[in-house]
């Protein structure tokens, strides 16, 4: 993975192979010929870091023309479009004649549980969906894997991808803080507060300490 930063608009551009280096910035159309290219970590390392961050919890798409954000909660299948998720931003984007640029159901972002990854697909949109600075056509090349700081284009409109994660530490902490749910033991029901036992099935109030126990 390689990266360069446009010296005119400050746009960060990433690409997989050195021969994929763009000649012109897709945002401001400035020449990138003399810009220094930086080599990033291998994609395998990035994937390992993604796993360490925890499970995906959604993503944010930042419209590069205005800075407006589309905050998307996690779902197995997300439909983006003028009449779907993101319509508050996407519905305002028009061409020079005032007509819509984004289709009603423009593209989908689908979650793969085993890989803990989002994948981008076009939904036969009028102006197309494209991935990365090289603008890979998602109609002919479906299931483009989304990583943090990727660029996607709905038609010609650029959006920066920011992934959201539910941290592993947070999940472990929530599990630890979750009240202990006990079932009836040979001695009876065990109180979650004082750990005494009683046998009355109709009462969840400990006869010793008076604590309410939730066995649901």
Image (tube, grey):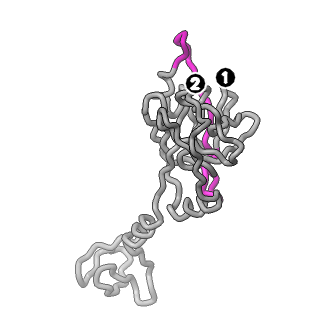
Q: Which residue corresponds to mark 1? A: 126
* Badge count: 2
Mark 2, other Cα within 10 Å: few <14 / some 14–19 / many ≥20: many
**Which badge, 2 or 1, is on the more N-terminal residue?**
2
Q: Where is the C terminus found, in terms of image quarters?
A: bottom left
- Which range is magenta? 94-119
Residue at the front extreme of this rendering: 34
Where is residue 52? Give x, y as percent: 53, 65
Residue positioned 54% across, 26% down in the render: 82
Q: In this view, does 77 lie to the left or right of 214?
A: right
Residue 48 found in image quarter: bottom right
Q: Which residue corresponds to mark 2? A: 102
Residue at the right extreme of this rendering: 140
Mark 1, other Cα within 10 Å: few <14 / some 14–19 / many ≥20: some
| Most foreground residue, 122 or 40 | 40
Where is residue 55? Give x, y as percent: 53, 59
Any part of residue 201 in sight:
yes
Any part of residue 63 in sight:
no
Where is residue 165? Give x, y as percent: 48, 55
Residue at the top extreme of this rendering: 97
| Most foreground residue, 185 or 122 | 122
Helix, strand or loop at mark 2: loop
């Amino acid at each position: 993975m390689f990266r360069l930063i446009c010296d005119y608009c400050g746009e960060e551009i990433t690409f997989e192979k050195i021969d994929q280096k763009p000649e012109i910035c897709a945002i401001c159309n400035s020449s990138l010929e003399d810009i220094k290219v930086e080599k990033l970590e291998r994609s395998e390392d990035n994937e390992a870091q993604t796993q360490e961050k925890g499970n995906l919890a959604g993503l944010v798409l930042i419209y590069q023309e205005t800075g407006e954000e589309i905050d998307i909660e996690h779902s197995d299948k997300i439909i983006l479009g003028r009449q779907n998720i993101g319509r508050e931003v996407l519905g305002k984007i028009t061409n020079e004649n005032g007509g819509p640029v984004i289709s009603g159901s423009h593209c989908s972002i689908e979650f793969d549980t085993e890989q803990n990854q989002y994948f981008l697909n076009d939904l036969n949109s009028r102006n197309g969906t494209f991935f990365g600075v090289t603008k890979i056509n998602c109609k002919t090349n479906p299931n483009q894997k989304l990583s943090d700081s990727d660029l996607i284009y709905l038609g010609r409109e650029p959006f920066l991808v920011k992934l959201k994660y539910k941290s592993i530490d947070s999940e472990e902490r929530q599990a630890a803080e979750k009240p202990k749910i006990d079932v009836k033991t040979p001695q009876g029901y065990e109180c979650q507060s004082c750990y005494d036992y009683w046998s009355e099935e109709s009462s969840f109030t400990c006869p010793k300490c008076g604590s309410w126990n939730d066995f649901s």
